[in-house]
Image (cartoon, rainbow, N blue to C red):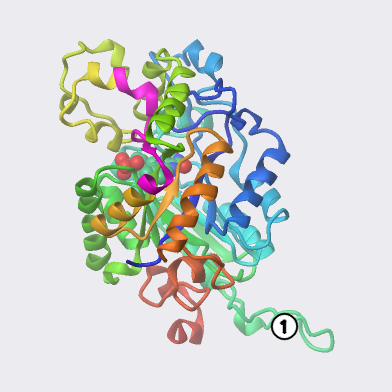
Amino acid sequence: MRRLRFGLFENAQANDSGTATWRHPDNQRVRFDELAYWRDLARLCEDARLDFLFLADAWGWADVNGERPEICSVEGLDLPRLDPAVVASALMAQTEQLGLVMTGSVLTEQPYAFARRMASLDQLSGGRIGWNVVTTGTAETAVQAFGIPMVPHDERYRMADDFMELVYKLWEGAWEPDALVKDKGGVFADPSKVHRIAHEGPYFRSHGYGNTAYSPQGTPVLFQAGASPAGRAFGGKHGECMFIGAGSVAQLAEHTRAIRAEAVASGRSADAVKIMSAFACVVGKTTADAERKYQRVLDAQSPEVAVASYAWFTGLDLSSYEPDTPMTELHTELSQTQVARFAGLTVGDVLKDWHAHGVGAKPVVGTPEEIADRLCELAEGADLDGFLLSPVIQPGSTQDFVEHVLPILRERGVAGKEYEGATLRERLLGTGSAMLPAEHPAAAHRAGGLRRAA
Ligand SMILES: Cc1cc2nc3c(=O)[nH]c(=O)nc-3n(C[C@H](O)[C@H](O)[C@H](O)COP(=O)(O)O)c2cc1C
């Protein structure tokens, strides 16, 4: 079996994934607004040699009939949060090798400013930055906050394509990697390696010079998690690493086949995209012990969050439908995945279940051996390249995984013991280069001879 990659899913807010676990006595997530919480967590990841810490993000909030329900404040469901770029920036100083991946939205960001922010992070971290490209699941409320028009689901992916082309020009084409000479007796930068860029796209335009020079990776490692047909096509074209939700071997295998087929359709090789599934687990000394531990997590959560939480991700108010309405009758311009995954169920079923794990799936609950077995079964059966550990509570879930499950995976030779490669791209993609490979669409925007040499 191939060597698997591991990342930790995080979110700079008190709760995660549409659940409200903050009341659990051992859950430290409620300290998301303290630097010490993030420092300790990042060091835990780095000491365990996890490949990266991922900071998810959302701009929007839950909206039911034009109002943010009170339960959202009572349970800290959707807001408040911190900016992931600021958290990543703080954490690069607390770590030396850990990859730092953050979500950034093509709907709300300005590409020129965003390109500079990411290049700055990549520069100062020595090439440890990844960007999870999202079109924003919570778009309907986010656009109100930004005072911009709503863009329908599939069009947001066309907008994303345009955004990518512009940031590729800035990251790959504006400054050549060896443009900075810094020779005090000669030149600071070689003018022949600094290029004017021009972009006149359907959504974005920019003319002029890049505000930052070529960073260690040029383009940060590109992550993507769209699961709708438009999302998969976008991921197959641009993504280097795709996140998929948790599921059965058959469900995950269907996802990986579709994503790899999209990569091939975009002229890339099937394994150019590394696919990581979200994975939550509750570890116990015995299966019964783990079940008890999980029950305490469930008991800490209020079922009242379900309506608001589902509306946050989909804009749909499930309380306004008859409970026996089939989920297939519902449509959203927000996260279509969160409707499609419940195809065989009714509105009532989803309302009963959603508060327990929100966008996530039920965790694997068991002994370290049972969890390691399940991870191996999923990876092998569904052609996965790794897992994104989704903690149930923090830092307990991460500690349990690192102390009890990871050593078993190492013994089996499926998890690495040391970081290999200096940059996040070299480590995750095994490309032997910090730069994107020549077959990736970004490489077409590279300036001069570097494009051919890549
Ligand atoms: C592991 C994982 C992490 C995700 N992180 C984010 C995130 O941080 N922000 C966000 O808006 N959507 C996030 N998503 C959702 C997707 O990126 C995508 O926006 C959503 O599924 C809607 O697009 P779709 O209809 O194409 O699936 C995540 C999905 C998965 C599986």
Ligand 1 image position (quadrant): top left
Q: Position of residue 419 (x, y in %)?
A: 56, 67
Residue 356 covered by magenta stretch: yes
Residue at the (33%, 51%) spot, across then down: 373
In this view, 312 is above or below 401: above
Quadrant holding the C terminus: bottom left
> What count of labels does the image hold?
1
Residue 311 can be seen in this image: no
- Name the one closer to the observer, 36 or 170: 36
Residue receiving disc 1: 181
Apparent side of residue 166 relative to residue 157 in the rendered image (left or right): right
Residue at the (30%, 49%) spot, across then down: 231
Is label 1 in a helix, a strand or a loop?
loop
- Name the one closer to the observer, 168 or 409: 409
Query: What range is drawn magenta here?
Result: 352-371
Residue 435 covered by magenta stretch: no
